[in-house]
Every structure is written in structure tokens, then in C-alpha cells.
Image (tube, grey):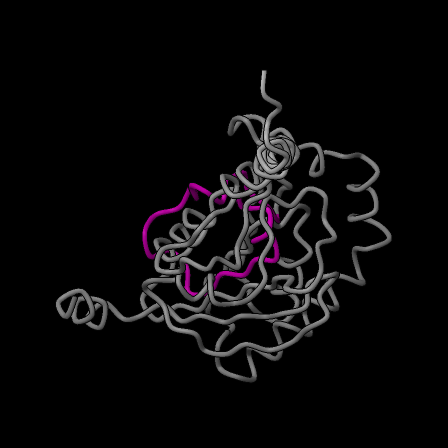
Amino acid sequence: MKPKPPMLVYFVISLILSLPLLFFFFCFKTNTYTPPGNPNSDLKIRPGYTTYKTYIQRQLNKTLNPKLRKIWTTRDWDRKIQVFADFFQVLKQENLLFNESKALCIGARVGQEVEALRRIGVSDSVGMDLVPYPPLVVEGDFHRQPFDDGTFDFEFSNVFDHALFPDKFVGEIERTLKPGGICVLHVALSRRADKYSANDLYSVKPLVNLFTNSKVVRVRKVDGFGLDTEVVFRKIEKQDQEMIRGSR
């Protein structure tokens, strides 16, 4: 029997050694979420959620953690309310939030954001989370909000990173906002700190693409409990939406 040529042997060995790398690349690629209209995604879904029930249970593990809930309602209570109140006061000064606004805080847990809004005069405010915390927070899944279309003038959230389906998260905001309504998101672009997060965001571009019925009002840097960027959107008026659809 003739010996195999050395080049063929090297090729076979290289192919075998490269299989684990190819497998890793394939697994990573299948867990990458590409927002509509953005093929070079800066928004990636974290792997490991085999079912929606698995995802919900993981979120509940944080929300129902007795140690965390005690911290949220005692040591962190006044401190977080003051920080949120400062954020919201800026929005009031910019005429993006008013005392008359009907406001929703998404992923509010024990409702510090809601309490902050009420303390600065926005009395018609409510929070929503998987676990209710009366009277500040009602039960609801941000992938399917339990509210009618066009309910709110203002929506705030700092849990975008917990959305397993970012398009549904944003779609529900736009559905429940009134035309001309304001949405404010606090997100992390430079830190991957929360082990309960379901996605990682690397720029504001995916958010802009996801908000198909809204325009960006502004983007600014903030220091919001590990979140570094505030993005403000205004829902487009109905006549403008129809004009945009007609031009497509």
C-alpha cells in the first residue's frame, strides 16, 4: 500500500481540529437576534432559554428573591426614588412629561419609579411587573401588556435587557402609547452586568429600527444603576403613520 501524501494527512488533521470551532460559531450564530432592517445586529439574544416558561421562571427567580425584595423596599427605597425623580424632572423641564400625563413604568418590581413620578406631581402613574406590588405595581408581561391600545401618554423602562423578544417588547410600547406619546428607555451599551438579562445591546441603532412608529427625540448618557444611556422616543401621530405607510 502506498503511503498517503503528507499534504492530505495535514488537511485531514486540520479539518478534525477545526470542527469544534465551527460548531461553536454555528451555535453562536443561531442565538443572534437580528432586528428588522438591521442585518449587522448590535442586539444579541443570550442562549439558554429552551422554552418561554424557562425564561419566565428565571425572571421570577430575581423578582421573588426575598433578599433582593427586602433591599428594594428598605435600603434602596428612598435612594432609588430620588434618582428616578431627578431623571423625570429633566423630562418635565423638556416638556416630555407633564403632571397630567398618564404614565406606565415597565418592569417596575416594587414601584420606586412609580413613587418617584407621583412625588413630582405625575399622579396618574402605575407600574407593571410579573409580580404585582399593590398599590404601585400591577401584574403583567411586557411582551403582552394588559392594557388597551393608546392608553398612556408616557412609558418608562430600564429592563429592556430582560426582553427575550425585543420586537414584542417595543411593539407593545408603541401599541399602548397614544399618538405623540413619549417612551423613555434606560439601557446599557457598555456593561454586561445583569446575569438575568436576556439580551445584550451594543448601540442604539437596533432600538431605532425596532421603533417603527416612533422618532428619536434624543439620546444622552446617564448613570442609572448600571445603565449608561437614555433614549427618548415620540410615537408618530396617526396621520404621519398613514403617510409613511403610503409611501412604501
Magenta segment includes 157: yes
Height in image: 4 above or below 167? above
Residue extending furthest toward the left: 246
The percent position of residue 37, horizontal first and vertical second, equals 35, 60
Task: Please identify the quadrant where the N terminus is shown.
Answer: top right
Height in image: 161 above or below 222? above
Q: Is residue 199 visible?
A: yes
Report the side of 59 relative to 223 (left or right). Answer: left
Q: Nearer the viewer, residue 103 or 46?
A: 46
Magenta segment includes 192: no
Residue at the spot 55% in from the left edge and 55% down from the top edge? 105
* Residue 7 quadrant: top right
Looking at the rendering, the stretch of residues picked out in magenta corresponds to 136-163
Residue at the spot 65% in from the left edge and 62% down from the top edge? 188
Report the side of 154 relative to 20 (left or right). Answer: left
Q: Is residue 59 visible?
A: no
